[in-house]
Image (spheres, rainbow, N blue to C red):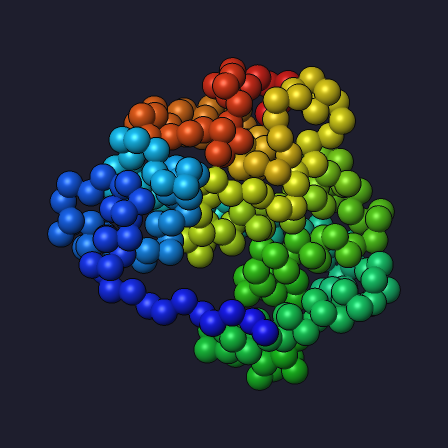
Amino acid sequence: MSKDLKKPTTYDQQITKLKSKGLNIPDEAAAVQTLQELNYYRLSGYWYQLLQPKFKDGTTFTLIQSLHEFDMELRHILMYELEKLELFFRTQLAYLFSHKHGTDGHYQQENFRRPSYHEAFVNELSIAMHRNKDMPFVAHHRNNYDGRMPLWRAVEVLSFTALSKFYSNLLISDQRDFALQMGFNATYLTNWLHALSVLRNICAHYGRLYNRTMSPPINLGPRTLRNYPQIEQNTLFAYIVVLLRCQRQQSKKNTIVNTLANLINQYAASLYLRLLGFPADWPTLLCDSKLI
């Protein structure tokens, strides 16, 4: 028999519970306001590593708030870069695939490796069009083309996840051609697009990045892992390495690294960077052209 779900608690009861575990809350009214805005359970992800089983000496509610604020700003930085990357990927995939297979090539099963995956893609496109039926270009294709549209328009309603799956189901030769155009190995790119689509969804839905194991593990390649053994593949740091690799201009890489460094320095007193997978020598690594 399953356990009964826990009963809801009031904000005052939540404060009492935290204080009983040794959390220093100098301004209880302000703490209640924070709990009203952010949810006890959301905040618990930021204090979990500080419980032993009580809070470490000196742990304050202000520290928890600081970790949440850092995480929020980190999501904003990464989401901005992921959005640009997603748009570039959409554009290139639609352009190259359509010129090779024609206007309606994405509807033809023979252009893909797994029929069931292709069927799922076509179904997902249909759902996406229905969800966006009030958009003028969607309505135009529903009314004039039996709901079919070329890929360069379809990508405007498909999610990054759907496009990642689309790429993973391309014929091997098409995967290689596209990856080559992007300057990457097709095996790695399949994994990277999957991973970055997951990261994009976490950021878009206000998910926690701090103290989180990332899945799928990122494929950095055996040579990278041999030369940089301090990097763990299931960490946010590894994901950031790949996000930087996907930048086409060194100046953009430098800008991202500087922005991250400024944010980390701002919150340095509150952070345990190991919970993000950042090695001790992370500033050197993110400036290493052989890595990124």
**Residue in view at x 38 percent, y 43 percent:** 46
Q: Is residue 257 visible?
A: yes
Location of residue 59 with respect to 155 vertically, above or below: above
Dividing the picture into quadrants, the one containing residue 227 is top right
Dividing the picture into quadrants, the one containing residue 151 is bottom right
Residue 113: x and y, percent? 84, 59
Dividing the picture into quadrants, the one containing residue 117 is bottom right
**Residue in view at x 61 percent, y 22 percent:** 230
Residue 250: x and y, percent? 53, 24
Q: Left or right of 282: which side holds 54?
A: left
Location of residue 3 with respect to 25 vertically, above or below: below
Q: Nearer the viewer, residue 150 or 118?
A: 118
Location of residue 269 with respect to 187 vertically, above or below: above
Q: Is residue 247 visible?
A: no
Residue 291: x and y, percent? 62, 22
Q: Left or right of 233: which side holds 23?
A: left
Q: Nearer the viewer, residue 210 or 190?
A: 210
Total count of labels: 0
**Residue in view at x 75 percent, y 36 percent:** 185
Location of residue 170 with respect to 52 vertically, above or below: below
**Residue in view at x 35 percent, y 50 percent:** 43
Q: Which quadrant: the N terminus?
A: bottom right
Q: Which quadrant: the C terminus?
A: top right
Q: Nearer the viewer, residue 212 or 290?
A: 212
